Every structure is written in structure tokens, then in C-alpha cells.
């Protein structure tokens, strides 16, 4: 029987970027936007707060866009300070590249196994689905899901008792499946 695990975000990730005021390198997004119109041109920023000093920084979302080319529902979501929109924009590679930022997902996600910590069967097939593009080490997910140590998971991989079509070393942010043989 196939077990289904889901990796879901619990909060917005921290933004990795150098603060110009205190030299901290972490910012916290709270879902606030600033929208500025200059005649027919529109600028929009996602506001982030430095975790060290509380200084506000702006992440460019829209830059000198014609007002008519911006979808009205996007503009409404920015005016409403939509937290879901902030999460979408932080995951957008164009926004991350434009602002030269990276994301720190530590302590910002959880694994929902549906109570499948049972290791009593001969073989366990597990499908892991990501609700958001959260880079996580599969070894860490498997260890957390079954209540094992990471060293024991590594040993299971080395012995061939834990197999997958994807490489289990490194980080993954996409769906994958694996089989644990006992």
C-alpha cells in the first residue's frame, strides 16, 4: 500500500539578504506591500523587516509598469496585503533573481505523514508531495517521517534497503517516491 506524505509550509521563509544598517543577513516577510503610482506607471514592492535591527527593505515586484498592463486582481491582492501573494512572490525565481535574494526554509515547514510511522511491514512505498517548492534533504524527511536517525537512513541507503528513482543525497524540492524494505 502506498503511503502519502506532504511537505507543507508553516510560515513564510526568511529572506537571505545583507542589511545595510546592521550587517545582519536575514529578513522576515510579513506580507505587506507598498504600491506607488506615478502618472500611468506603477511600482510595487514587498516589504521585509531585518531580524537584527527591524529596518525595512523593499523587494521589487513591479517596476515602472503601465497601470493597464497590471491585472486588477493582482493589484487588489497587493492593496489587501495578501499573505498568499507574498508567499507566491517569494517563490518566484524572477523576483528572487531581480532582488538577488535566497530563501531560508529552516523551521518554516512540516511533514505530514498521516500517522504512517509503522515499520512492521515487509516493504513500505511512500510518495512525498511538496505543497510548495521547499528545498529539503530527502534523508532528513525520511528520518523524520519514520522516527529514525539520519545515520540510520544513510545506512539503509548504502545497504540497498531504501531505494528511489531520484537521488536521495542533496536537496529536493519536487515530488518523489521511495521504497523502504525491511
Image (spheres, rainbow, N blue to C red):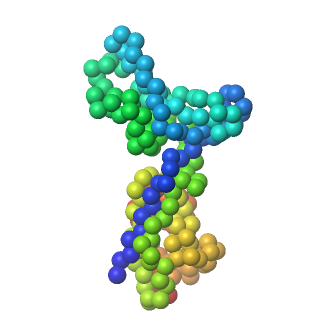
Q: Is residue 19 above or below residue 102?
A: above
Residue drawn at x 46%, y 30% as measured from the top left: 33
Residue drawn at x 54%, y 53% as measured from the top left: 108
Horizontal arrangement in the rendering, residue 164 relative to residue 14 (left or right) = left
Quadrant including the N terminus: bottom left
Q: Residue furthest right?
A: 22
x, y percent for residue 124: 42, 81
x, y percent for residue 44: 43, 25
How many marks on residues? Answer: 0
Q: Residue furthest top?
A: 39
Q: Residue furthest front?
A: 80
Residue drawn at x 52%, y 67% as measured from the top left: 141
Q: Is residue 1 above or below residue 102?
A: below
Q: Is residue 70 visible?
A: yes
Residue drawn at x 64%, y 30% as measured from the top left: 55
In front of the other: 154 or 44? 44
Q: Is residue 152 above or below residue 33?
A: below
Q: Is residue 55 above or below residue 88?
A: above
x, y percent for residue 166: 45, 66
Q: Is residue 92 visible?
A: no
Residue 53: quadrant of the picture: top right
Amino acid at each position: 500500500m502506498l503511503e502519502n506524505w506532504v511537505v507543507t509550509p508553516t510560515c513564510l521563509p526568511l529572506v537571505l539578504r545583507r542589511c545595510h544598517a546592521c550587517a545582519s543577513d536575514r529578513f522576515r516577510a510579513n506580507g505587506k506591500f507598498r504600491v506607488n503610482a506615478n502618472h500611468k506607471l506603477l511600482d510595487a514592492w514587498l516589504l521585509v523587516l531585518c531580524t537584527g535591527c527591524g529596518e525595512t527593505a523593499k523587494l521589487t515586484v513591479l517596476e515602472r509598469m503601465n497601470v493597464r498592463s497590471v491585472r486588477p486582481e493582482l493589484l487588489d491582492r497587493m492593496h489587501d496585503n495578501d499573505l498568499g501573494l507574498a508567499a507566491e512572490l517569494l517563490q518566484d525565481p524572477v523576483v528572487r533573481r531581480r532582488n538577488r535574494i535566497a530563501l531560508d526554509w529552516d523551521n518554516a515547514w512540516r511533514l505530514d505523514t498521516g500517522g504512517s510511522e509503522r515499520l512492521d511491514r515487509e516493504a513500505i512505498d511512500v510518495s512525498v508531495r511538496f505543497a510548495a517548492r521547499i528545498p529539503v534533504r530527502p534523508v532528513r524527511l525520511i528520518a523524520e517521517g519514520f522516527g529514525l536517525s539520519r545515520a540510520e537512513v544513510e545506512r539503509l541507503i548504502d545497504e540497498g534497503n531504501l531505494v528511489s528513482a531520484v537521488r536521495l543525497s542533496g536537496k529536493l524540492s519536487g515530488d518523489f517516491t521511495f521504497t523502504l524494505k525491511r
